[in-house]
């Protein structure tokens, strides 16, 4: 990366600031004093071998778990321990490792339900057909995700790749400032994975992304910043090319050092 490009990256505002997050399950320190920052408009990825603690860290950040120690700041506000619905109102949305769609509803009905959160509280119990802000957001998402031909199809009949793409669309329905993606390509074919990677890359800039992903090659191609975990601790972090060349990371993944 050139010096001007690096200066531009550093100058971007920190949108997520995680400091010394920790949680233990009995004697197991699943996440042990992990700190990192994610910057506005960038893709920050969490990777690590199986059992490294990356999914637990993700759940601490996203509100699924409450940390025993440490803080999470989103923008200028501390959000440590907030529940996912509270974080959504703050502008932080997440997808899940296991797809969570209304399989018996159509694509457009799933989108309408997700976008209804944009409506004022006084309109919360009005029919979806009267939800003007939600309808506008649905139209935007349909165009952005090229869903025109799938609108009336039941979500349960979509392919796995299409379901994962729809779930990302639902997470974006509330117009979040940051999107948390938990292994969005899990179970996808090679073609679907490439399409998902291109989609995630296209989101950066408009929204900040925190990604947990097992596909290291994809992470290195997508990410602006990579955080590597091993045995509950942060092992390394930095730009993808620096992380890839880190001897400790090579040992953690491959059991021996490899040439970068």
Image: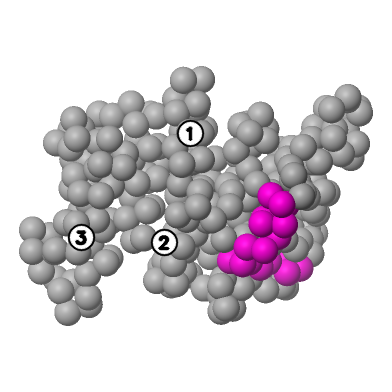
Q: Label 2's element?
A: loop
- Depicted 24 relative to depicted 170: above or below: below
Task: Tell whether 142 sits left or right of 23.
Answer: left
Q: CA distance from mark 1 to mark 2?
A: 20 Å
Task: Tell whether 42 sits left or right of 120.
Answer: right
Task: Tell whether 57 sits left or right of 178.
Answer: right
* Disc on res. 176: 2
* Disc on res. 132: none
**Which residue carries the number 1 mark?**
198
Indicate which disc, 3 or 2, sits on the residue closer to the N terminus: 3
- Depicted 119 relative to depicted 198: above or below: below
**Toward which corner of the image does residue 151 lie, by quadrant?**
top left
Q: CA distance from mark 3 to mark 2?
A: 14 Å
Q: Decide if residue 174 is in sight here.
A: yes
| Residue 191 point in image, percent of width and height | 46, 20
Q: Residues within 10 Å of mark 2 (few under 14, many from 20)?
A: many
The verdict on residue 50 being magenta is no
Q: Which residue lies at the image location 40% right of the left edge and 45% below the top edge? A: 168
Q: Which residue lies at the image location 52% right of the left edge and 73% below the top edge? A: 82
Task: Tell whether 31 sits left or right of 235.
Answer: left
| Residue 227 point in image, percent of width and height | 73, 49
Do residues under tags 3 and 2 come within 8 Å of each other at their CB atoms? no
Residue pushed farthest top?
A: 190
Do residues under tags 1 and 3 come within 8 Å of each other at their CB atoms? no
Q: CA distance from mark 1 to mark 3?
A: 26 Å
Q: Residues within 10 Å of mark 3 (few under 14, many from 20)?
A: many
Q: Which residues are magenta?
A: 4-25
Judge by depth and name the residue closer to the eye, 38 or 34: 38
Indicate which disc, 1 or 3, sits on the residue closer to the N terminus: 3
Q: Which residue lies at the image location 56% right of the left edge and 73% below the top edge? A: 75
* Disc on res. 134: 3
């Amino acid at each position: 990366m050139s010096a001007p490009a690096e200066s531009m990256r550093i100058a971007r505002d920190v949108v997520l600031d995680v400091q010394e997050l920790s949680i233990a399950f009995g004697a197991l320190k699943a996440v042990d004093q992990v700190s990192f920052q994610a910057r506005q408009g960038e893709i920050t990825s969490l990777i690590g071998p199986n059992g490294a603690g990356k999914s637990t860290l993700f759940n601490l950040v996203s509100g699924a778990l409450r940390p025993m120690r440490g803080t999470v700041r989103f923008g200028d506000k501390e959000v440590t321990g907030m529940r996912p619905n509270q974080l959504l109102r703050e502008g932080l949305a997440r997808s899940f490792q296991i797809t969570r769609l209304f399989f018996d509803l159509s694509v457009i009905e799933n989108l309408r339900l997700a976008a209804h959160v944009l409506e004022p509280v006084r309109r919360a119990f009005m029919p979806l057909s009267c939800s003007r802000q939600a309808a506008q957001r649905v139209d935007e998402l349909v165009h952005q995700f090229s869903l025109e031909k799938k609108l009336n199809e039941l979500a349960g009949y979509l392919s796995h790749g299409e379901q994962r793409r729809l779930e990302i669309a639902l997470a974006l329905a509330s117009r979040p400032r940051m999107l948390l993606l938990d292994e969005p390509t899990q179970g996808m074919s090679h073609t679907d994975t490439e399409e998902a990677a291109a989609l995630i890359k296209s989101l950066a800039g408009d929204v900040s992304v925190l990604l947990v992903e097992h596909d290291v090659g994809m992470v290195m191609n997508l990410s602006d910043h990579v955080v590597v975990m091993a045995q509950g601790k942060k092992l390394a972090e930095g730009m993808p090319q620096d992380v890839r060349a880190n001897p400790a990371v090579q040992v953690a993944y491959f059991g021996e050092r490899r040439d970068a």
